């Protein structure tokens, strides 16, 4: 499957095209593998990769598959694979092209698990939240954290992990149904619909003591509101750029002076530098997910290539809670 982006236009299904090619089974180089792709993770950044121009190219995202041929001892034939693949039936991966960011799931895999959890709460998204909160959060009992896109894949976990450490958790999401889910299922202390409510007013009412942490997934003008409402010595953890994925122009906050005056910490986090912590993450999170202490919403859409563009469209319009995956094949 290929895609192309149009500058200033939110990604939609018309940006995708299915291409059929038939190739012989390749001879693998030393260190490379052949993967049969089964479940693709839909992620907001996918179309962002094309925003440099309107060029059409293969869609690449994270996916789960089975190793069907291998010249790499870390990924023997038959093992279950998680890593960056093109949206195609079979992918060849080398160390330089994808394998260094891939994981052999058999080590952590339980037969009862749905594979798609490794796209979400037990995958890169879950790891990002777990690690970024530890590294950048400096979480303290009694503090108030605000999480944007809180009913999304990262947001739903961020709220629960902060809650477990005794913080007061406020989230925002784009529908009343998602807001109810945050409060009634995930146990957020407060939540609001950022599409129908004034964000500044809602946050002022819901956090009368001010904010101590803003876990930012949007990189939009919410940062400006947060800067105004953050307490002295508090922090912003900048993790996502959903506004940019939506084709919006990025605008710098006008009140950056708060960083100086309130001695704030405004730090970015990018997961790719921290894979060495993956084993510790699994040890801790697999248990919490299995015994139901961490809850998560996810949707696995059947129908493969025929439905993926439409599903992506709906996903970007906020049509789902939590992780969205598309199943292309059985393993
Ligand atoms: N820094 C890292 O290392 C790292 C790692 C993984 C992911 N990320 C980034 O983290 C962000 C969140 O990822 P995710 O997988 O958890 O996505 P997500 O929240 O599951 O996916 C998209 C959701 O975002 C919401 N949304 C759309 N536009 C929005 C906007 N302008 N402002 C706020 N929410 C909006 C929609 O829900 P609503 O109905 O609520 O609008 C939609 O359902 C993405 O930017 C992703 O690229 C960063």
Image (spheres, rainbow, N blue to C red):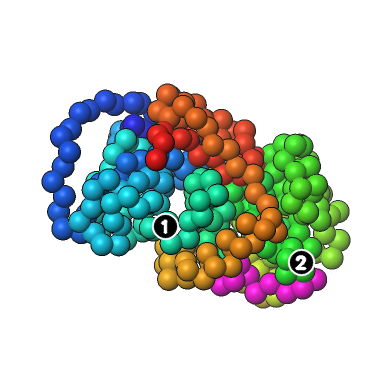
Q: In this rendered view, identify the residue nearer to me: 292 or 208.
A: 292
Residue 325 shown left or right of residue 216 in the figure: left
- Give the residue displayed 54% in from the left and 50% down from the top: 113
- Give the residue displayed 42% in from the left and 56% down from the top: 105
Q: Is residue 138 magenta?
A: yes
- The earlier-in-sequence mark between 2 and 1 is 1
Give the numbered dot on residue 189: none
Q: Quadrant of the N terminus?
A: top left
Q: In this rendered view, identify the residue nearer to me: 292 or 176.
A: 292
Q: Position of residue 98 (x, y in %)?
A: 31, 54
- Give the residue displayed 62% in from the left and 33% down from the top: 319
SS category of the residue bearing label 2: loop
- Give the residue displayed 47% in from the left and 43% down from the top: 41
Q: Is residue 249 magenta?
A: no
Residue 251: tell me if it is visible. no
Mark 2 and mark 1: Cα distance apart in space: 35 Å
Q: Quadrant of the C terminus?
A: top left
In the image, the segment drawn in magenta is: 131-143
Q: How many marks?
A: 2
Where 30 falls versus 14 (above or below)? below
Residue 166: tell me if it is visible. yes
Q: Position of residue 51 (x, y in %)?
A: 39, 41
Crowding near the residue tagged with mark 2, few <14, some 14–19, many ≥20 C-alpha atoms within 10 Å: many
**Residue 35 location, quadrant:** top left
SS category of the residue bearing label 1: helix
Q: Position of residue 235 (x, y in %)?
A: 65, 68
Q: Can you tell me whether the CB of the residue at mark 2 lies under 8 Å from the nearest atom of ligand 1?
A: no
Crowding near the residue tagged with mark 1, few <14, some 14–19, many ≥20 C-alpha atoms within 10 Å: some
Q: Name the residue tied to disc 1.
A: 106
Q: Position of residue 280 (x, y in %)?
A: 52, 71
Q: Name the residue tied to disc 2.
A: 167
């Amino acid at each position: 499957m290929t895609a192309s982006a149009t500058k200033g236009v939110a990604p939609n299904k018309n940006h995708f095209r299915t291409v059929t090619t038939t190739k012989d089974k390749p001879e693998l180089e030393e260190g490379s593998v052949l993967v049969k792709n089964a479940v693709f993770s839909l992620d907001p950044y996918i179309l962002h990769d094309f925003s440099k121009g309107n060029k059409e190219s293969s869609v690449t995202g994270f996916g789960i598959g089975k190793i069907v041929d291998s010249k790499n001892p870390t990924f023997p034939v038959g093992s279950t694979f998680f890593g960056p693949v093109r949206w195609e039936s079979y992918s060849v991966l080398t160390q330089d092209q994808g394998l260094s960011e891939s994981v052999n799931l058999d080590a952590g895999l339980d037969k009862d698990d749905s594979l798609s959890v490794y796209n979400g709460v037990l995958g890169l998204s879950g790891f990002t939240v777990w690690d970024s909160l530890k590294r950048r959060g400096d979480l303290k009992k009694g503090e108030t954290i605000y999480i944007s896109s809180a009913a999304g894949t990262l947001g739903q976990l961020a709220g629960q992990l902060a809650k477990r450490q005794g913080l007061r958790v406020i989230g925002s999401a784009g529908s009343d149904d998602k807001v109810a889910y945050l409060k009634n299922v995930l146990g957020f202390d407060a939540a609001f619909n950022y599409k129908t409510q004034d964000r500044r007013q809602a946050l002022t009412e819901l956090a009368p003591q001010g904010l101590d942490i803003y876990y930012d997934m949007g990189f939009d003008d919410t940062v400006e509101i947060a800067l105004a409402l953050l307490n002295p010595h508090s922090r912003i953890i900048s993790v996502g750029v959903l506004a940019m994925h939506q084709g919006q122009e990025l605008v710098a906050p006008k009140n950056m002076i708060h960083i100086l005056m309130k001695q704030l910490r405004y730090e970015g986090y990018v997961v790719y530098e921290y894979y060495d912590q993956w084993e510790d993450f699994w040890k801790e999170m697999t248990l919490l997910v299995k015994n139901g202490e961490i809850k998560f919403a996810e949707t696995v859409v059947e129908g493969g290539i025929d439905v993926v563009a439409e599903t992506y469209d709906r996903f970007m319009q906020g049509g789902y809670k939590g992780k969205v995956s598309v199943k292309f094949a059985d393993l």
